[in-house]
Image: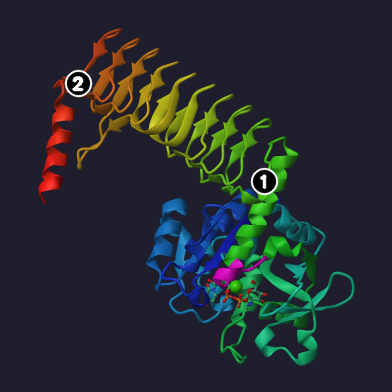
Amino acid sequence: MTERAAVILAAGQGTRMRSPLPKVLHKVGGRTLLDRAIDAADALGCVRIVVVAGPHSPQVSAHARARLGEGAVVLQDRPLGTGHAVRAAEHALADFSGDLLVAYADTPLLDADAVAPLFEARAKGADLAVLGFYAADAGAYGRLILGEGDALHRIVEAKDASPDELQISACNSGVLAGPATLLFDLLKAVRNDNAKGEYYLTDVIGLARDRDLKVSVVFAPEARVLGVNAQAELAAAEAAFQETRRASALAQGVSMPAPETVMFAYDTVLEPGVLVEPYVVFGPGVMVRSGAVIRAFSHLEGAEVDPGAIVGPYARLRPGARIGAGAHVGNFVEIKQARLEEGVKVNHLSYIGDGSIGARTNVGAGTIFCNYDGFDKFQTHVGADAFIGSNTALVAPVRVGAGAMTGSGSVITQDVPDNALALGRARQVEKRGWADRFRALKREGRKQT
Ligand code: UD1
Ligand code: CA
């Protein structure tokens, strides 16, 4: 197989988003647009991936460097167009002579399956292959001027198109593939004498045809190649992503009585036989095993839920929450960086942060793991078969032994041995008849005023 590299364009201003956050760092399914583009290139086996970023958004460069390394980011000094942007990557790919995939970072639903046919077209003899689609509303997309069969003659940008050309519904997705050396060579001939005064990448198609090269077009479903330029399109991409994920979860045996209310992340894993009630949000990094139930209005992120566990309604699982088999996490319970062994019950109004709870332990309502002193975080460990009385404050670092109990309302600051009862609360005082005397005094006072 010819070696593959990718250039991902992310140096545009993204002004139409009207957001202080760079466009390509917005997310779909909890993953940035930029990471999604890189994921697709990765999945296609690209040995080199170069991100073209702009000097105006150091956040984008930093993000790409953190993932791909220093050499993988090049700067386009000024956003003079997509063709100009690809040229910014030429130097970084000087020693590369395989096939180059060019993709825009603002096409979040693109995946390897949609792009792979471009390389098939290359294998069948096309010099360049372009990914197109038929748009329901072609709007500002570049239009494909098609020839016989799968031939593509040129791409005309909407702003430069004649009224007749604007009627064309075959559009450019922005993704193309061809030999790196050929692409960089063609780009040298691209001019900016057009409506936007930009160097269009899309002009390489017409230039290739002028040289009698073979350019093929491959069509993808519109949903895969939707470009995000404004918030409404980002929302539309999110909706399309969610619809796909819901359908595949249902197809894989997940029960969801109201799938349209459940939000997935790009990497959510729900095993067959999981039940997800309405209005559940999965952030990144969630794994729920067979037979677990996620009840309504719960929010999970970075969490693992074992078979038969019940989470919610109204539960919040934060990163590092590990919910053992058959455990119950009830309403208004927050769990972070903590492992609940099998059969643990934390049913009401609790915060369990930084620690662990042994098997079958029951944690009473209102229990708090006091894990933070304003500077550092500390651990709380509760053994198996323990019983934590309601409204216990466990002040970390602290351990409660197996089989131990704490009295309701206790503030536990010292380790509790196995099977002990710990009480850390004021003794009750009773004053006989006090309430009666109090009421009499109050009534007397009222009469006088
Ligand atoms: C582009 C295509 C259009 C296609 C559409 C698909 C061109 C000239 N037009 O239009 O044919 O239908 O995408 O979504 O290519 N970028 C840079 N540097 C620049 C300009 C842009 O890196 O100087 C990056 C942007 O960050 C973005 C991508 O290139 O990720 C596309 O740029 P954008 O301005 O969104 O192009 P469109 O007008 O959408
Ligand atoms: Ca775009």
Q: Quadrant of residue 388?
A: top left
User: At 66% from the left edge and 51% from the top edge, which residue is drawn?
Assistant: 260
Quadrant of the rendered structure where residue 62 is? bottom left
Q: Amino acid at mark 1?
A: Ala
Residue pictured at 50% horizontal, 62% vertical: 26
Looking at the rendering, the stretch of residues picked out in magenta corresponds to 226-233
Residue 229: say if magenta.
yes
Q: In the picture provided, is 98 more to the left or to the right than 90? A: right
Q: Which residue is mark 1?
A: 258
Residue 27, position as x, y percentages in the image: 52, 58
Q: Secondary structure at mark 1?
A: loop
Quickly name the residue at label 2: 424
**Residue 271, image x and y in percent?**
64, 32
Question: Does residue 333 lie above or below 245 as drawn?
Answer: above
As displayed, is residue 174 above or below residue 320?
below
Q: Say which residue appears at 53% left-offset and 44% top-offset.
A: 297
